[in-house]
Amino acid sequence: MNEKILMLLNNKEEYYPHKLEQQFPQILNKIMMMWDSPEFDSYLNKFMLDKREHARQGFPPDIASEIMRLSMLHSEQFGAASTGSWVEPSHIKLD
């Protein structure tokens, strides 16, 4: 478990993205690099809202859940970006 990631998650081990870290470490690293930046939601939207001509396979459900949980936690900490987030934190409970 990466201590820096855990610290960004306010030491909430239940939110730690174990499967994302194992299967898509480059994506997790980029998410953590952008954690407190205004581009965070745009980066996640790139994965969740496909605008390409060819259909994507998508993430396995457990990976998508971890990404969504990170997005919700980020929105809880920093608020959703003014450009809009695909997660509405006021309607979702993290517990």
Image (cartoon, grey):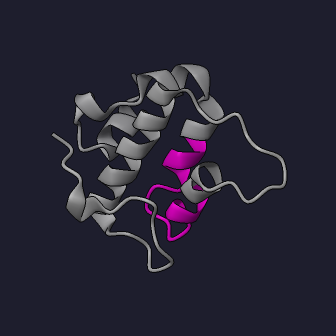
Residue 36 to residue 83: above or below:
above
What secondary structure prevails in the magenta region? helix
The range drawn in magenta is 29-43
Residue at image position (49%, 46%) is 32
Residue 26 x/y as whole percent: 65, 35
Location of residue 81 with respect to 42 vertically, above or below: below
On whether residue 73 falls in the magenta region, the answer is no
**On the image, which quarter does residue 62 sit in?**
top left
Q: In the rendering, at what x and y percent does residue 55 appear? A: 77, 44
Q: From the viewer's side, name the closer residue of 71 and 4.
A: 71
Across and down, in percent, residue 51 comes to: 73, 60
Q: Does 95 appear above or below 74?
A: above
Examine the structure image and report whether residue 41 is included in the region drawn in magenta. Answer: yes
The quarter of the image holding the C terminus is: top left
Residue under the point 84% across and 54% down: 53
| Residue at screen point 41% across, 30% down | 17
Q: Residue furthest bottom?
A: 82
